[in-house]
């Protein structure tokens, strides 16, 4: 079954040219937002979308370019539209999201909680979770910031979505060989090697075998992306706002 992926933003954390690297996944009757960064509300607005059209939000990790827009979407959902979107998040991240990130803005001082804004659905890592009959997600822990939980995703078993992760050629080889992934969406730092160690860099990704590179769409990139067009081997940059049908 095919799905569509639309990056509402493809930028790195501090990009001023692209919105935060967050994605809409359209599967039959369900629209899932993967991550909701600081710029996500504006990025959705530019697509003429409101939170009413988002059935669920899935969080990969707690950096602001992945959760910084949740307060606005929570208030809009509750007070503008009186709806409760589903919130999918690994159970280990759930308490940290409320206590260390959202509580300051969302709490009403009378004991309210995350469940007052979202239908919270904890996800067990490494287990296939059915989001909707035509959309399954498996979340696996990957290396990003030392000692900070971060997850990458398998979408419908054959699409790998890195979210934010360091270069892991063994994992990518395994994904290619054993999981038969057809498409890999991978974050890509365009900084010179050694400057940003918490994302895979273009120079690292270019060391991958050709048959893996040609599955890779590069995302989470810096404002200087256009300088690197045609310099990405068999990989290509995913475009912000463009819809990609992935079978
Ligand atoms: N140890 C760290 C932690 C953070 N960072 C930068 O901060 C950004 C947070 O969002 P991100 O998209 O994960 O990218 C991180 C690095 O740019 C970094 O470069 N090194
Ligand atoms: Zn990020
Ligand atoms: Zn991050």
Image (cartoon, helix red, strand yellow):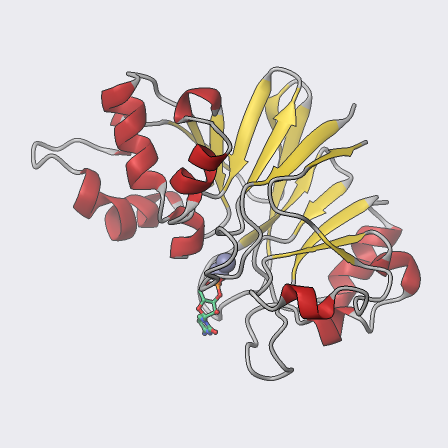
Please say whether residue 91 is visible from this viewpoint: no
State the residue in front, 239 or 205.
Answer: 239
Residue at 47 percent of width and 25 percent of height: 54
Q: How many marks?
A: 0
The C terminus: image quadrant: top right
Residue 27, x across and y down, in percent: 65, 23
Please say whether residue 103 is visible from this viewpoint: yes
State the residue in front, 40 or 207.
Answer: 40
Residue 226, x across and y down, in percent: 67, 64
Query: Vertical placement of 215 versus 233: above or below?
Result: above
Residue at 47 percent of width and 36 percent of height: 46
Query: Vertical placement of 54 versus 114: above or below?
Result: above
Query: Vertical placement of 146 versus 22: above or below?
Result: below
Residue 246, x across and y down, in percent: 77, 34
- Image quarter for residue 25? top right
Looking at the image, residue 100 sits to the left or right of residue 12; the answer is left
Residue 77, x across and y down, in percent: 32, 24
Looking at the image, residue 44 sits to the left or right of residue 166; the answer is left
Residue at 30 percent of width and 37 percent of height: 72
Query: Vertical placement of 34 versus 175: above or below?
Result: above
> Given the current orientation, which residue lies at the most extreme right position?
211
State the residue in front, 33 or 179.
Answer: 33
Looking at the image, residue 94 sits to the left or right of residue 201; the answer is left
The N terminus: image quadrant: top right
- Image quarter for residue 186? bottom right
Residue at 22 percent of width and 33 percent of height: 113
- Image quarter for residue 202? bottom right
């Amino acid at each position: 079954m095919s799905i569509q992926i639309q990056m509402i933003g493809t930028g790195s954390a501090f990009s001023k040219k692209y919105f935060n690297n967050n994605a809409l996944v359209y599967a039959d009757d369900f629209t899932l937002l993967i991550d909701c960064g600081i710029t996500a509300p504006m990025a959705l607005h530019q697509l003429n979308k409101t939170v009413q059209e988002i059935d669920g939000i899935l969080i990969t990790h707690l950096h602001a370019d992945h959760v910084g827009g949740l307060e606005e979407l929570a208030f809009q959902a509750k007070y503008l539209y009186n709806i409760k979107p589903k919130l999918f998040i690994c159970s280990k991240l759930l308490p940290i999201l409320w206590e260390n990130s959202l509580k300051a803005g969302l709490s009403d001082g009378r004991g309210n909680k995350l469940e007052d804004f979202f239908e919270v659905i904890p996800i067990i890592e490494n287990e296939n979770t059915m989001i909707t009959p035509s959309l399954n997600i498996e979340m696996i822990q990957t290396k990003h910031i030392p000692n900070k939980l971060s997850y990458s995703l398998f979408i419908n078993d054959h699409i790998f979505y890195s979210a934010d992760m360091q270069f892991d050629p063994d994992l990518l080889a395994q994904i290619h060989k054993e999981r038969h992934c057809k498409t890999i969406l991978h974050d890509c730092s365009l900084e010179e090697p050694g400057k940003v160690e918490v994302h895979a860099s273009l120079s690292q990704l270019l060391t991958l075998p050709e048959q893996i590179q040609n599955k890779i769409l590069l995302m989470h990139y810096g404002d200087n992306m256009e300088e690197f067009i045609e310099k990405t081997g068999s990989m290509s940059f995913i475009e912000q706002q463009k819809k990609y049908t992935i079978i």
